[in-house]
Image: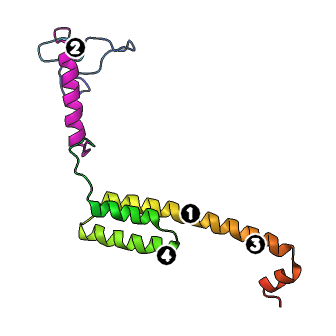
Amino acid sequence: MSDDSTDAPKCGALTKAGAPCRTYARPGQSTCYSHATDIAPEVKRAARARGGHATAHAKGHTPTAPDTPSVSADALELVAEVQRASSPGEIAASLTKVYAAVLRGAVPARVGAVCAQLANAAIKAFQADVSARLKRLEKKLDQHPELRRAWDGEC
């Protein structure tokens, strides 16, 4: 008995790389489905497409085809609200609304995730802006020692 769990014969064809094909031969045949010369190429292509589709669904992948449900207007408005937020406080308030809507089931979790990503990017932009402003202020303070001492709490 061979090392394989079955005694089915392997395909007798070679791969494009020149190595022996490792797939099992079709019952009563010497080659696998891919190397069969008696099956039209169009039929093989269609079978591969169906097989890939079935495998993807079996693994839990869902298509992003036109039949995917659309997002509600309310969900899109929440995304827009996060995008319009002009301060960290507004971001926090809009994210609170998104969070509540996701928990209620009014907004898909994927929309909530997008809102969180937008909010994170906005907060990083605010942080960069505040950091740049602070550096400019400190440079100006360095030009005025009396103001610098007052700023540092020495007065």
Q: Quadrant of the N terminus?
A: top left
At mark 1, the secondary structure is helix
At mark 4, the secondary structure is helix
**Badge 2: residue crowd in 10 Å (few <14, some 14–19, many ≥20):** few
From the image, tell me which residue sits under label 1: 124
What residue sits 32% from the left and 12% below the top? 14
Q: Amino acid at mark 4?
A: Gly
From the image, tell me which residue sits under label 3: 137
Residue 5 visible: no
Return the residue nearer the eye: 11 or 49.
49
What residue sits 16% from the left and 18% below the top? 26
Q: Amino acid at mark 3?
A: Leu
Q: Residue 154 has which mark? A: none
From the image, tell me which residue sits under label 4: 89
Magenta residues span 37-63
**Badge 3: residue crowd in 10 Å (few <14, some 14–19, many ≥20):** few
Q: How many marks?
A: 4
Q: Is 49 contained in the magenta span?
A: yes
Could you say which quadrant of the image residue 71 lies in?
Answer: bottom left
Q: Is 151 contained in the magenta span?
A: no
Q: Amino acid at mark 2?
A: Pro
What residue sits 88% from the left and 79% below the top? 145
Measured Cα–Cα span from mark 2 to mark 3: 71 Å
Measured Cα–Cα span from mark 4 to mark 1: 14 Å
Q: Residue 41 has which mark? A: 2
Q: Earlier in the sequence, mark 4 or mark 1?
A: 4
At mark 2, the secondary structure is helix
What residue sits 25% from the left and 41% below the top? 65
Return the residue nearer the eye: 21 or 91.
91
Measured Cα–Cα span from mark 1 to mark 3: 20 Å
Q: Earlier in the sequence, mark 2 or mark 3?
A: 2
For residue 9, side relative to residue 112 (left or right): left
